[in-house]
Image (tube, coloured by chain):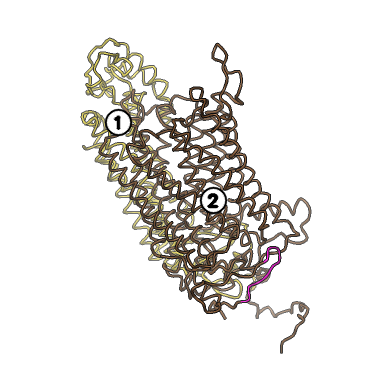
Chain colours: A brown, B yellow
Amino acid sequence: MATLTQAPPKPPKLVPREARAYPVGHEPVHNYLREPRPADDVRGLKRAWAWFKLWALSVDHKRIGIMYLVAVSVFFTVGGLLALGIRTELFFVNTYDASGAVVGGNIMGQDAYNRVFTMHGLVMVFLFIIPSIPATMGNFLLPIMVGAKDVAFPRLNLLSLYVYMAGAIIALISITTGGVDTGWTFYTPYSKETGTAVIAMAMGAFVMGFSSILTGLNFIVTIHKMRAPGMTWNRMPLFLWSLYATSIVQILATPVIGITLVLLVMERVFGIGIFDPALGGDPILFQHFFWFYSHPAVYIMILPAFGVISELMGTFSRQRVYGYRAVALSSVAIALLGFLVWGHHMFTSGQSPVSSVVFSLITFLIGIPSGIKVFNWIWTMYKGSVWLKTPMIYALTFLFLFTIGGVTGIMVGALSVDIHLHDTYFVVAHFHYVMMGGTVMAFLGGIHYWWPKMTGKLYNETLGKWSALFVFVGFNMTFFIQFVMGSQGMPRRYYDYPDMPWLEPLHQASTIGSYVLGVGLLLVLINGLLSIRKKTPRAPGNPWGGATLEWTHTTSPPDHHNFHHTPLVTHGPYDYEVLFRSSGDSQRGAPVPDVSVGAPQEMHVTVDDGTK
Amino acid sequence: MATNPQITVDDPHTGGDGAHHDGGHHGGDGHAHGEPHMMVGHDGELHPSNLQFYFVSTEQQFESAKLGMWLFLATEILLFGGMFVAYGIFRVLYPELYEQASMQLDTTLGAFNTLVLLLSSLTMAWAIRAAQMDNRKLLIQMLSATIVLAGFFLVVKYFEYEHKYHLGILPGEAFVLEEGTPRVEDLVEGVPATPLITFGEESEGGDGGGDAAPAGETGSAEATPAAASAAPAGDAAHSDDHGEYAREGEIFSNRRAGIFFGIYYMMTGVHAIHIIIGMIAIGFLVYYSWKGKYSSVYYTPVENVGLYWHIVDVIWIFVFPLMYLI
C-alpha cells in the first residue's frame, strides 16, 4: 500500500451545514503545530509589522525566551563595553601636575569612572546575569523538559518580559539625570547624599524584581503541576531541579530587595530616616537588607548554571550524571543555605563578632553542596565517552574556573583572611571567577548546546572552539592577575593607583586579557549571527544525542505547541544507553552520535515515546 | 442554528493576538462567551471554554492558578517582612520611643478599622461560597459589600492621616519636633550621644528644633498628598491652643520620633496601596460576575482574589497591635 509520491491536496469538500462541527466562519484553519505567521497576502511594511506583532505579543514561551536572549545579549554587550572602559582607564597610572590635576594616562574623569563601574555592575547584575539563564534557556526549555505545551501562566510570562524592559528603561533614565556612582550595592548613607539618579536606578531595580518574581513563580507552578505522565521528580533533568531551586530563591528573596529599594527611595524623597543615622536610623540595616537579597541573588545567578553544566556533562560524556539525587538536592540545599550567609559581606561593617563567626561557619557549609556537584560532574566524565564539542569545552572551562572561584570564596569567607582582602581586587577576582567563570561560561555552553534547538541551525564548530579558547585565555589573563593584585592591596573601585606603581604591569596584563576576552565573546556573537543565515542548513532534531524531552520528542526548532502528543516519559533524563543502544559495552557509555556540522543528519534510532 | 450565540469557537492557536489566556483571566478579547462550562471545541476536540490549551484538565488549571497565588502571597509576606524587621529592630533599640509614639495613634479608630477589615474578609469568603453555589446575585452583593468595606477602611485611614498631618506627626525628618529638641547635628563633640531621649531640654543648638520646622513644611506637602490642601504643618506646630489638634506627649521632644512614624507611614501606606489594588481587582470581579462569567464550575479568579484579600487582612491583623496597642 505504501506510495512514494504524495497525492496532491484535494479541494475541500462542501459539507452539509448540519454535519459541520463548527459554526460557519469558525472552522479551525490552524494546524496548531505550525508557528503562527502573517498571511501570505500581507506584504511589505505591513508584513514586517505583522511579524513584529506576532513576536511582541506572543505568549509562546519559546518566543519569549528568544526575546529575552536578544535583550540580555544586548545588555551583556553594554556591560562588557563598560568593563573594557574600566580596564582601559586602569592601563596606566595617571600622571599629575604640581597642582594635582591629571595630565596623562587617563581616558575619563574620576566621577565618570565611578559611574562607569557602577553602571557595569548594575547592568551585569540586574539586566544580564539574573535573567540570563532562567529567562532565556529556562523559558525556552522548561515547559518542553517537563513535557508541557507552555508554562502555567503564559501571559504572566510575557508580562515579566515587559516588566523587565520597563525596569531597564527606568534604570537607564538614571543616566540622563547624572548617573549613579554608588556602586551596584547602593550603600547608605552615601546613596542618600549622592545625585538623584539613585532614585531612578533603585526604582528600575525594584521593577525588574517583579519580572524575576513572575518568572520564578511561573517555573515553580509549571514544575509542580504540569509535568507529563511519567515525568516523576526523579526523572526531571537536573536543569529543572536547578531552575526550581533558583525559583525558590527568586520568590523568597526578591521581595526583600523590593522593599529595601522602596525604603531607600522613600529615604531619598521624604527622608523617612530608617537608614539615616542623623534621625536615629541605621545605615548598617540597609546592608543587612541588601545582602539578605543579594547574597541569595548570587545563587539565582549560579544555580541555573549548575543545571546547564549537569546537562552538558551528561550528554557530552554519553553517560548518566553521577549521583543524580545528590546533584539535584544539593541545588535545593544551596538555595536554602544561601539565605543564611549574607553577613559574610559585612565582616568589616562592625557587626557583632559572634554573628561574623556564625556567618563564616555557614559560608563554609555552602562549600559542601557545591563540592558535591563538582565531584559528581568529574565522576560523570570518568569512563564516559567524553565528546569535546564546543558546549563541553565551555563546561570544562566552567569546572576549572568555578572551582577556583569557589575555593577563593572559602578563603574570603574566613574571617581573618577577609579582613585583609575585604574590598580588594581579590574579591573582585573571586566573584568574577564565580559569576563570569561560572555563570557566563555555563550560559555560553548552554547557548551552544541548545542553539540548534532554539534556532534550528547549527553553529560553526571550528569558530565555536576558537571562541572558547579566546574566552578561556582572556578570562584567566584578566582575572587571575587580579587575585595577585588584590593580595598586594589593590583596592576595588579605585580610579587610580599612584601609590602602587609596581602594579602597573599587572594592570596592563589584565587589561590586555580583557581585550582578548572581548574578542572571544565577539567571536561567539559572530558565530551565532553567521549560523542563522538562510543558507546555513537546518539542524537535526537531536544533534547531540541528548536524552531529555527537548531532544527526543521535538523538532528543531520545536513546533508551536512543542509536542504532537503529550509525551509519556518512560526513562530517566540521562539514560543514553537505553535510548541509543550501543555495542553492549556498557562500560564505555552510549555512543557518540554521528554528526558532521553543517550536514543535517537525523540519528537512526527509534525512540518509544509511548505515542505509537 | 448556525449563528447560535451560545456556541463560540475558542481557538487559542491563532498566535499572539490576545486569544491566549492564563489563569482564567478571560474577557476583553472580543469573544462572546456563553455559559462558562459550555463545551466548545477546536481541532475536533471538545473542551470547557475556560480551559486553556496548555492545561490537560480544569482541575490542573485551577490548582496551578491557586498554587501561583499562594506563591505570590509568600512574596507579599516577605515584602512586609522587611518592614516588620525594621519595626522590630528599632523597637529593640528605642523602646521608649515606641511607647511614646504609639500613644499618638488612635486605638479606637484602629480597632474599628480592624473590625471593618475582618468583616470584609467575611464578605469575601461569602462571595466565594456564593460562586460555588451558583448564586450570582449573592456573589455580586458580597463582592460589592467587600469593596464598600474596603472603602470604609480607607476613609478612616484618611482621617487618621489627616489628623497626624495637622499635628506635624510626619515621617522622618519631616516630623515637627518641639522647639529646642536637639538633633544629631546639634550634638557636638563633648555632648554624649547616648541619651536616647531628650525631653525638650535646651542644648547649645537650641535653634535646632526651629530649623527643623521649615524642613517639616517642605517635606510634609509631599508626605501626605491626601492632605495637601490642608493647613501647612508649620502652623500646627505652633498652634497648641487648637483644642482638636493638641500636640501632647513626650514624643514631640524625642528627636527620633521620625523613625517610628517613618515605619508607621511605610507600613500603613504600603498596606493601603494593597487595599486599593484589592478594590480594583474585586471591581473587575463584580464586572465579570455581572457578565455571568463565574459559576460553580469556574470561579478561580474569585478564589484567588479572595486569598489575596485575606492576606491583606492578615497583615493588618499584625500591623494593628504592633503599631497601636503595644
Residue numbers of the magenta segment: A596-604
Q: Amino acid at mark 1?
A: Phe
Above-or-below relation of A208 to A117 = below
Q: Quadrant of the C terminus of chain A?
A: bottom right
Q: Residue furthest bottom?
A: A1
Q: Chain of mark 2?
A: A
Report how far apart the C-alphas of labels 1 and 2 lie in the structure. Answer: 47 Å
Of the pair A250 and A603, the residue shown nearer to us? A603
**Which residue in the structure is indicated by mark 1?**
B260
Q: Are marks 1 and 2 on the same chain?
A: no
**Which residue in the structure is indicated by mark 2?**
A441
Q: Does the magenta stretch mainly form a helix, a strand or a loop? A: loop
Of the pair A34 and A501, the residue shown nearer to us? A501
Q: Position of residue A261 (x, y in %)?
A: 43, 37
Of the pair B8 and B272, the residue shown nearer to us? B272
Contact, mark 1 vs mark 2 (Cβ under 8 Å) = no
Q: Amino acid at mark 2?
A: Met
Q: Position of residue A407 (x, y in %)?
A: 41, 47
Mark 1 surroundings: few (<14), some (14-19) or many (≥20) residues within 10 A: many
Of the pair B151 and A467, the residue shown nearer to us? A467
Left/right placement of residue A254 relative to residue B198 reads right
Q: Position of residue A98 (x, y in %)?
A: 55, 11
Does the magenta-highlighted stretch encompass residue A291?
no
